[in-house]
Image (cartoon, rainbow, N blue to C red):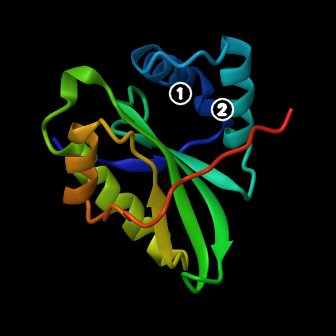
Amino acid sequence: MTAVLTLASIGDLGKVAPLVAAFHAEEALTTSEPQRIAAVTHRLEGTPLGSLYLNGPRVKPIGYVVVSHGFSIEFGGPNAFIDKIYICTPVRGKGIGVESLLQICKILKAGGTKAVHLEVDQTNTVAQRLYSRGGFDLLSNYNLMSKELH
């Protein structure tokens, strides 16, 4: 099985929403359904701040990749942050995750992106191995810090 990424649009909301809900349930994230739908809708409406790619056949995707775009002096220009990558449980372990990472990096590079970042739970060694196979390095001298704005 191979990764096939296609840029999603608002017409794909009905396909994306259940995948996002499945991911949130799996990760025990407490985002409410209205919050999830609003965020996904915003992303699918074509904001220049990011994009969402369906993975697999458009009629029945097996996952998704969410990318946020930014700019970095340190990395020499446009950069991207993989906000989420999700592959449905039944098709995991077949190399689709690594292929997805390689493909999204190729897409982003073609668009002028200079660096791609992602975050990973310090205890999630399975994800860390996946990201390493996709060419990502753990930056031990950096910590991701966040502040929610209410």
Q: Classify 150 as above or below 51.
A: above
Instruction: In the rendered structure, find residue 8 and report the number of the disc placed on it.
Output: none
Q: Quadrant of residue 104?
A: bottom left
Locate the C terminus by quadrant. top right
Q: Quadrant of residue 54?
A: top left
User: What kind of element bears circle 1?
Assistant: helix
Residue 2 in percent (x, y) is at 20, 46
Residue at 67% of width from left, 40% of height from top? 44
Tell me how far mark 2 sits from mark 1, CA to CA: 8 Å
Residue 115 in percent (x, y) is at 48, 73
Kindly identify which residue carries mark 1.
Answer: 16
Residue at 62% of width from left, 76% of height from top? 78
Position of 143 with respect to 90 (left or right) is right
Residue at 39% of width from left, 17% of height from top? 26
Foreground pick, 127 / 49: 127
Which residue is outermost to the bottom? Answer: 76
Callouts 2 and 1 close, C-beta under 8 Å: yes
Of marks 2 and 1, which one's residue comes earlier in the chain? 1
